[in-house]
Image (cartoon, coloured by chain):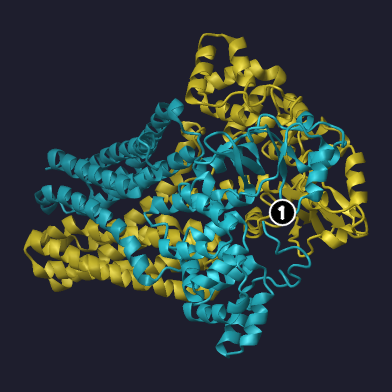
Chain colours: A yellow, B cyan
Amino acid sequence: MTEETVIGVNNSGAAHELTPEFIAAVNLALDQNETTEAISLAQSLHYADLADLLENLAHVRRAELVEALRSDFDPNVFAELDDTVRERVIDQLGISHIAEAVAGLDTDDALDVVEELNTDEQQEVLEALPAGERSLIEQGLSYPEDSAGRLMQREVVAVPMHWTVGQAIDYMRDTENLPTDFFDLFLVDPLHNPVGTVPLSRVMRTGRDVELTDVMRKHIKIVPVEMDQEEVAFLFRQRDLISAPVVDGAGRLVGVITVDDIVDVIYEEHEEDIMRLAGVGEEDDLYSAVIDTMKSRFSWLLIHLGAAMIAAYVISFFAGTIEEMVALAVLMPIVATMGGTASVQTLTVAVRAIAMKELTMSNAYRTIGKEVAVGVLNGILFAILIGAVAWAWFGSPALGGVIGLAIVINLIVAGFTGSALPILLQRMGYDPAVASSAFLTSITDVVGFYVFLGLAASLLL
Amino acid sequence: MTEETVIGVNNSGAAHELTPEFIAAVNLALDQNETTEAISLAQSLHYADLADLLENLAHVRRAELVEALRSDFDPNVFAELDDTVRERVIDQLGISHIAEAVAGLDTDDALDVVEELNTDEQQEVLEALPAGERSLIEQGLSYPEDSAGRLMQREVVAVPMHWTVGQAIDYMRDTENLPTDFFDLFLVDPLHNPVGTVPLSRVMRTGRDVELTDVMRKHIKIVPVEMDQEEVAFLFRQRDLISAPVVDGAGRLVGVITVDDIVDVIYEEHEEDIMRLAGVGEEDDLYSAVIDTMKSRFSWLLIHLGAAMIAAYVISFFAGTIEEMVALAVLMPIVATMGGTASVQTLTVAVRAIAMKELTMSNAYRTIGKEVAVGVLNGILFAILIGAVAWAWFGSPALGGVIGLAIVINLIVAGFTGSALPILLQRMGYDPAVASSAFLTSITDVVGFYVFLGLAASLLL
């Protein structure tokens, strides 16, 4: 929430949309050194669109544009930029420039920018701020990363619980430094503990003489300052909240979290889930340098290599068997692929259900049982299908039987491990998404190769 | 937004939290046929928690509890239930009961429930509604699924643009049937086209005599009724919106979308992405019956089987080579696994970047180029590593060289296809997430086996 979209403050705001043609026009202007044209195009954008434009430009072009905009670079752009790009822009503009910019932001947006800096830089920015704002941001930094304390805005509209609607309206009319936008009044008792909220639409429609306590929402959700942001987001979604009071250890109202920040958290947390499932670092985005991306992928590939080595080792036990019957080498990847696919399917459903709090200890056994049952059923169907193909291809009904049996066993293992492993990780306090494909497909690979080749060795030769 | 949390309407609301112990208590009460106890426990919950409770119970227990609650089943629970569970509860309560319940909901929540019913059931429910509400819901159903029209609430607070702040306040005080909660006033011209918005906090703090046009936000984002909900969500995130006006084809204000509905959309869309990447149907949730889950997984497994068959067919070309050198069968899954892992990593980053509108046609070539470069670098590192292991294991430096070369080629292919395929799909108007692992890992499997075994056949034998 900022002043920028208010008429009069930024008359040129959002006059243009960020279309591919628009980006092309900016690129052209920069290419031909028409700096004035580039500046005027960039400044015709809403700050969120300007952030997107900067993300979209190639490194050199982005640096040129940032340089051109230096003297009146809108600080709100910082809060909207991708982390990697923000770091580059901050490096380019220089730390003293950032200190000035941060002073113009709300505490939550300012904290967003400051927390990304290294310790020396933070110190330099903090020293340049007015004492009041500085101490608020220092306090913010003292809360754990990804906690409610980092998300909240310190500017709250809190009024004594014994006031009437009229008193609250007069207070809001007469107080200068209220937040730019707010949606609820928080009622506090003499200890500054929140006791209820009154949505503005309700204040608006109630007579001046009515007591605030008569129109307040009483059973409100109160967010402790150290609550994890994922929990906070879940609360907002479940209760359709627009804003929620944040309290310190003593239950005193210290800030407010608004839904616009929660929307960002939800995107962030989902990104984390999706990236972890694929084994990609969260810092691995479109804007990272090739070398950083390579590093972030390397460790995951290494884990997969370890898993593949184990599978290769299992296969090597049966080298003699394969030499005698090369059809086994042809067919064995099928068993592994089917098991791997089924386990990733199961894992994905389980991880999502855990995130949505649908899968808990209350229904864990039931869920695992169901996944095993699905494994049995699909296992039988695919055993028949693949067994028939193997029989037809290599003319051996026994080979068809062996691969069918291996498929059934591997799909059951996939159903069991794909559901049990994330539940176990969650129980042990880890993020279930890290169970991810690596571990599971390595299990189904090993089981698949071992069962298929082992059965073949003992039954076919 | 509903009345339920307002004091006086539901005094018992949210008195309890939904803990595992609470669920155990409900289960126990149902087990021992203490229906009154079960009802009182269930009714002590907020409707969102009651929905979660119903989702958490086993089928039989859930049916028992729904039956017990039948006479005063809170209609708000419907909007919070998972689709599969909702369908079952609706079946159990019967359609006439649903019609009554729907009448008590806001238009957007009512539409949520009605759109899940089949045509006959919809007809029955609609006939039981008052004419006004009925026509609003019928209109809602006429908009495409997942469009702004389906999301919006018809109850809007719109005032003529020539009014003053005082006139708007008096209007809000005196009008009975305003929405329960709202956050912005919409100013409309004589044609009912929205021209600006005034946040309530601004109305509250401005003198009565000020013209609304002097304090309005002018550059507002207007949502066309047929806009896709994913687009709408992106707009809300980018602009930190709390509510947005929805207009029909003629630009007339027809409804409002509030951020609480957008939060649900974001969860829904991310779920869709994560499920598609793993090849799981969206209807595949924790509550589906075993047989439905089996079906939803079957088709994807079948596609993977097809891909695995192609890979097996490629291997069969080299059956003779493998017979001569069985080490190839032992090592070949490593080449395939490394390629598959790298392509899923690349795909995930690309799909996410496309969803966030970070990856567009403006930087598509740059992105593909970067992913190929990452493939080259990681390919060289892993070629050295795996080549050394193969040499040491099988005592053949030539075998080490062949597998190293195969790894480099496969990681380059993975980087190229993992980024180019989703971009191409997006360009062609498909969801890039459907590119998913199946197609990509089948490409890297085939390339991996073919290159490794082909090089071995021509260089080693």
The subunit letter for the residue under badge 1 reads B
- Secondary structure at badge 1 equals loop
Residue A329: horizontal and vertical position, in percent?
18, 57
In terms of depth relative to the viewer, which is nearer, B106 or A140? B106
In terms of depth relative to the viewer, which is nearer, B48 or A226? B48
Q: Quadrant of residue A407?
A: bottom left
**At 54% across and 19% down in the image, what residue appears?**
A61
Taking the view exactly as shown, the residue that stands out farthest to the front is: B131
Q: Quadrant of the C terminus of chain B?
A: top left
Q: Quadrant of the N terminus of chain B?
A: bottom right
Category of crowding for the residue at label 1, using alpha-carbon neighbours closer than 10 angstroms: few (below 14), some (14–19), many (at least 20): few
The residue to which callout 1 is attached is B177
**At 18% across and 52% down in the image, what residue appears?**
B312
Q: Is residue A125 left or right of residue B302?
A: right
Is residue B24 at least partly visible in the picture? Answer: no
Residue type, mark 1 in image: Asn
Taking the view exactly as shown, the residue that stands out farthest to the left is: A395
Q: Is residue B56 left or right of residue B403?
A: right
**At 49% across and 60% down in the image, what residue appears?**
A351
Residue A303: horizontal and vertical position, in percent?
41, 52
Residue A312: horizontal and vertical position, in percent?
28, 56
Residue B111: horizontal and vertical position, in percent?
54, 56
Q: Is residue A94 left or right of residue B51?
A: right
In terms of depth relative to the viewer, which is nearer, A236 or B146? B146
Q: Is residue B280 left or right of residue B189?
A: left
Question: Compared with residue B150, is residue B2 higher up or lower down, i.e. above or below?
Answer: below
In terms of depth relative to the viewer, which is nearer, A346 or A414? A346
